[in-house]
Image (cartoon, grey):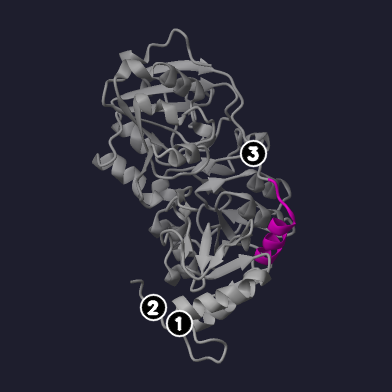
């Protein structure tokens, strides 16, 4: 895949920071060339989003330093090898960090669609924070992939925006996550809360897609989300997603990242009813506050008995991100008719994901929790005291873990039990 005649040392200097699009938006032929030529740069810094291709490996630390806002996807191998440095920031902050120079971008590598009739290229599968990097980078290198859809976006690119353009041809999709009985049960519980005309924000993974799959009989649903997946395409093709009742961007779905298979790519290609937008728009609190009936559907690694959410660390390994879930959950809480939903399986293997104390950081505070859903039911935490939250969370934990969790709640949280005497949080020593 690397371009044999491409000499990146003409464009990249030792000490530069290089950034590219995440997930399917990764310009794989350029990244492969960068890896193959890495010794020519002495040492560079690479900023990563969600990894999908697996082209970046721990052994490449011999000439590269790796920084990321998340440990998702193939970044897990870098995290486990101890070579990935994490920037724990809200997703909304990324463009401003780039513009201010706190996250300096010297070289931007973009995967783009073939040009349209007017000669302009779309951002393809991701816009997000890439326009901010485009405005800040000293060098912009583009890869025109003829298998990338031509997407409707808030920004597009002309030939003069690039210092170098190369051509490539390879598939960029990934299969949708498999849905089992557990995920479908969670989806059904979540769908029971969601009515016609809701505007949806969805996180990544099997559980949010299962929720979408349970909404096929709804009407006039809308989309305003950081990401769009195969589930979005299926929902639109069923007639359930029309965006007709959105209070802003009526008739148009909004997303920053497209992450899915050929099904999604066919749906978005030259489709004016879905628009790719910058992170500053998809996650802006002022924009979100104008959306009525906003339903935020996100997952988590674990949730404690009081509603605190860990979406970053699992078994001591950084596998997630602070991300944008907190912003959407807050917005959904404030939205007229909104629903802030966190949905997750009750267990990961033998281990409960409903816990008395988080094993990782608090990615979302308990004050921003709304509904927590597992395959065992729905815990509505809105307006509930700590003691009431514990009782409701125990009800949706896996049955085999409830007795232990109740005991740990008493021991570590000083939960007084079902007699209503309340809860006092014991501070860690």
Query: Mark 1 or 2 closer to N-term?
Result: 1
Tell me which residue sits at (68%, 64%) in the image.
375
Work out how far the residue at label 2 is from the one at label 3, CA to CA, in angstroms: 48 Å
Work out how far the residue at label 1 is from the one at label 2, CA to CA, in angstroms: 7 Å
The spot of residue 148 in percent (x, y) is 57, 28
On residue 426, which mark appears? 2
Q: Which residues are magenta?
A: 178-191
Q: Residue 394 or 257: which is nearer the viewer? A: 394
**SS class, disc 2:** loop
The spot of residue 187 in percent (x, y) is 68, 60
- The residue tagged 1 is 414
Contact (Cβ within 8 Å) of mark 1 with mark 2: yes
Query: Mark 2 or 3 closer to N-term?
Result: 3
Height in image: 243 above or below 407? above
On residue 264, which mark appears? 3
* Residue 27 seen from this side: yes
Tell me which residue sits at (71%, 58%) in the image.
182
Work out how far the residue at label 3 is from the one at label 1, CA to CA, in angstroms: 49 Å
The spot of residue 301 in percent (x, y) is 53, 57
Contact (Cβ within 8 Å) of mark 2 with mark 3: no
Q: Residue 358 or 140: which is nearer the viewer? A: 358
Q: Residue 163 or 89: which is nearer the viewer? A: 89
Query: Mark 3 or 1 closer to N-term?
Result: 3
The spot of residue 228 in percent (x, y) is 57, 45
């Amino acid at each position: 895949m690397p371009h044999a005649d491409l000499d990146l040392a003409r464009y990249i200097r030792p000490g530069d920071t290089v950034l590219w699009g995440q997930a399917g938006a990764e310009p794989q032929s350029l990244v492969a060339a960068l890896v193959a030529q890495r010794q020519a740069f002495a040492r560079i810094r690479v900023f990563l989003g969600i990894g999908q291709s697996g082209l970046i490996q721990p052994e490449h630390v011999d000439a590269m330093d790796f920084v990321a806002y998340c440990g998702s996807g193939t970044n897990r191998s870098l995290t486990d090898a101890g070579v990935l440095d994490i920037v724990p920031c809200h997703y909304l902050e990324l463009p401003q960090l780039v513009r201010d120079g706190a996250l300096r971008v010297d070289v931007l590598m973009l995967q783009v669609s073939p040009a349209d009739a007017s000669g302009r290229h779309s951002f393809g599968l991701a816009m997000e924070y890439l326009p901010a990097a485009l405005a800040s980078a000293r060098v912009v290198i583009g890869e025109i992939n003829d298998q990338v859809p031509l997407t409707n976006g808030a920004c597009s690119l002309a030939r003069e925006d690039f210092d170098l353009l190369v051509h490539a041809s390879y598939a960029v999709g990934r299969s949708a996550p498999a849905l089992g009985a557990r995920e479908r049960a969670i989806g059904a519980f979540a769908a029971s809360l969601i009515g016609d005309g809701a505007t949806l924000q969805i996180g990544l993974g099997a559980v949010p897609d299962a929720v979408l799959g349970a909404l096929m009989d709804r009407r006039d649903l809308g989309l305003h989300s950081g990401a769009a997946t195969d589930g979005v395409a299926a929902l639109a093709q069923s007639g359930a997603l029309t965006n007709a009742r959105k209070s802003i961007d009526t008739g148009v779905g909004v997303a920053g990242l497209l992450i899915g298979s050929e099904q999604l790519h066919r749906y978005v290609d030259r489709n004016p009813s879905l628009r790719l937008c910058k992170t500053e728009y998809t996650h802006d609190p002022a924009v979100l506050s104008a959306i009525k009936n906003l339903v935020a559907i996100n997952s988590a690694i674990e949730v404690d008995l009081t509603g605190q959410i860990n979406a970053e660390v699992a078994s001591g390994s950084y596998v997630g991100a602070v991300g944008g879930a907190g912003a959407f959950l807050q917005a959904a809480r404030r939205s007229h008719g909104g629903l802030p939903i966190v949905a997750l399986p009750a267990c990961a293997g033998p281990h409960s994901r409903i816990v008395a104390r988080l094993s990782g950081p608090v990615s979302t505070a308990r004050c921003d929790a709304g509904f927590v859903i597992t395959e065992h039911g729905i815990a509505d935490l809105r307006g509930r005291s700590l003691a009431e939250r514990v009782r409701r969370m125990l009800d949706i934990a896996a049955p085999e873990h409830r007795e232990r969790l109740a005991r740990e709640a008493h021991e570590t949280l000083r939960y007084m039990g079902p007699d209503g005497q309340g809860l006092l949080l014991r501070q860690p020593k």
